[in-house]
Amino acid sequence: MSRKGRVERGTKETQVLVEIDLDGTGEVDVATGVGFFDHMLAQLGKHGAFDLTVKTSGDLHIDSHHTIEDTAIALGQAFKQAMGDKAGIRRFADASIPLDESLAQVTVDVSGRPYLVHSEPENMAPMIGPDYDTTLTRHILESFVANAQVALHVHVPYGRNAHHIVEAQFKALARALRDAVAFDPKVHGIPSTKGAL
């Protein structure tokens, strides 16, 4: 069974292509024009063991918001497509990932019901590099959750360096998603008493 997703999304602001293979080996080919965001997407593919291609061209002459937002939307749509009917998967997973002084804790339920709980240290540096606004991390997660239709809780109880705080979140998200979509030999059919996710 192929667990791949492919989404092309075009607006007046961006053109996005996302391809994902949930049963890949972590091969990543990412280019959005936003260097730090590319680095985060690479973490998602590598640590999720997902083959991930992302190609985005956007209105970066304005700022990076549309490019990042639309990429996250397409990523969520592709992830949902790749999951298929979710038969035989674990469904629930969590991961705690340290990155130097920062710790990120992520819990996920690929439930079909989008919901995000997100907290990170206050007073973070407002920018990472020249074009990544740190307030966009929550917006990336919101856009992904709404389109992948998963419940996601992300908590960073402590951290000082903004780069570490954000990167730990993406690595923890990757590991949690990897475990949630993994097949479980004890699960037969859809892992829900409702018979659908």
Image: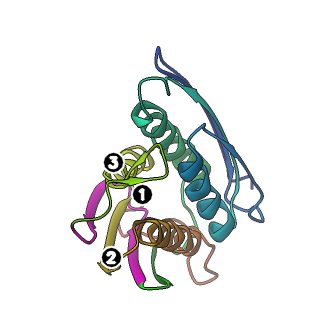
Instruction: Locate residue 33, reporting x and y percent.
Output: 60, 37
Instruction: Locate residue 42, reporting x and y percent.
Output: 65, 58
Check disc 3 and give the amino acid type. Answer: His
Q: Which residue is mark 2?
A: 156
Q: Which residue is mark 3?
A: 139
Residue 84 shown left or right of residue 12 in the figure: right
Q: Pick the residue in front: 135 or 182.
A: 135
Q: Pick the residue in front: 41 or 2.
A: 41
Labels 2 & 1 near each other (Cβ < 8 A) = no
Q: What is the magenta range?
A: 102-122
Instruction: Locate residue 131, reporting x and y percent.
Output: 46, 42
Disc 2 to disc 3, how far (Cα)?
A: 16 Å
| Residue 125 in magenta stretch | no
| Residue 112 in magenta stretch | yes
Q: Secondary structure at mark 1?
A: loop
**Number of callouts:** 3
Check disc 1 and give the amino acid type. Answer: Ala
Image: 93 above or below 14:
below
> Quarter holding the N terminus?
bottom right
Q: Which circle, 2 or 1, is nearer the viewer?
A: 2
Residue 119 shown left or right of residue 139 in the figure: left
N-terminal-most mark, 2 or 3: 3
Q: Which circle, 1 or 3, is nearer the viewer?
A: 3
Disc 2 to disc 1, how far (Cα)?
A: 32 Å
Q: Which residue is mark 1?
A: 196
